[in-house]
Amino acid sequence: MKVSVGQKNFRKALLLTEKVVGKNTSLPILNNILLKTENGRLRLSATNLEIGINTFIGSKIDEVGEIAVPAKILNDFISTINDEKITLVTKNNSLYINTDHYKTQILGFDPKDFPIIPKIKSEPICSVPPGELKNTLIAVLDSVSLSDSRPELAGVYVYIKNNQAVFASTDSFRLTEKILRFKHQEPATFILPRNTVSELIRVCGDLEDNLQIKFSENQISFFNDDFEILSRVVDGNYPDYKKVIPEGCISRVLVDKQELEKHLRLSGLFSSQVSDVKIQCSDNNLVLTAKNSDKGEIETSVPVTLKNEPFEISLNYRYLLDGLKNISTPSVILEYTGQGSPLLVKPGDDNKDMVYLIMPLRS
């Protein structure tokens, strides 16, 4: 292989690709990035056997070829140099990198040992802007279960139909539902693994063109002309989370989001090990109290607009902060649905594209 590439494009492609590479002692080949000429471009590939990434960059190809190269040393070297033009030459499983100021040899591996990243042959089911996909996944990530005891909860449930995709996640303590609207071709239902969601959030910020989605029985691919991320999907059936979301409420509160966040953080300084804060609402005033035998106690209040009855509820304040940070409106709506029932958090403009639910703490 003999290929010439620009340093900036090569570095960007490496940053997109190398994050899925881990320290795999049982399969050292997985610690590498595969460089391969393909259809007049250079393809960079990496996989951890659960997620695979392909990134394509324009290049001048004098000789076709391929090589597997240790990801860390390649990325560290390319990120450090500033020479604009880079020539890559392979010989006997070594990669020679030549620039105006450097001549470098990196020992590589036989590309035949690199795992094949499969291709999904079905037609795309939809196309989504990467920025909107990123914001949607950020909104649901916190509610994904960190435990693998129930694999289906350790992922994000996605249901595509009627020109929208519903994203939902729950860890049994809180639940998030976020709707992303776009034109679609075919309905689909799948569960994205937690690690795949994190990777998509990371890469979407560096992508400009829309991502198309292909889906098969056990794999999913998000791709455009220059990039592809392929992942397994979680095997199993997601619980009917809609049953947990109350249809009506007893009381409704409109509150300034920034003020509520500030007072929650102050109250949290005095919460116990379970991060509990009591919320009491009456007479257009929301009072937060917390008590800790080792630190002290606090009572603070926020002006609100209350509809219907006064109420009282104890919550994990960290969970409430997680929900607030993903709401973009200046104010938020809190809906009290009864003793022992969840508190609903919604955007202040009553937008129905997002709802966040928190289960109360027992007194």
Image (tube, rainbow, N blue to C red):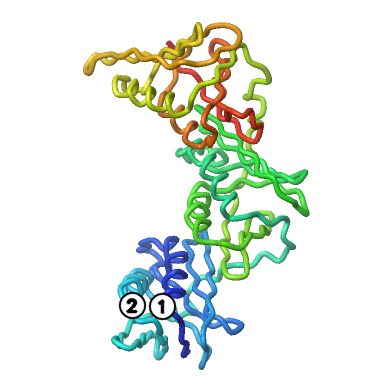
Give the number of the disc on residue 64.
Answer: none
**Amino acid residing under circle 2:** Asn
- Crowding at mark 1 (Cα within 10 Å: few <14, some 14-19, many 20+): some
Q: Which SS class for mark 2?
A: loop
C-alpha distance separating marks 2 and 1: 7 Å
Q: Which SS class for mark 1?
A: helix
Quadrant in the picture for the C terminus: top left
93 lies left or right of 223:
left
**Residue 118 figure quarter:** bottom right
Q: Who is closer to the viewer here, 208 or 169?
A: 208
| Residue occupying the point 35% across, 63% down | 25
Q: Quick check: 138 above or below 2?
A: above
Of all residues, the one furthest to the left in this rendering is 294
| Residue occupying the point 61% across, 82% down | 39
Label 2 close to label 1 by CB (< 8 Å): yes
Give the number of the disc on residue 7.
Answer: 1
Residue 319 seen:
no
Which residue is under mark 2? 82
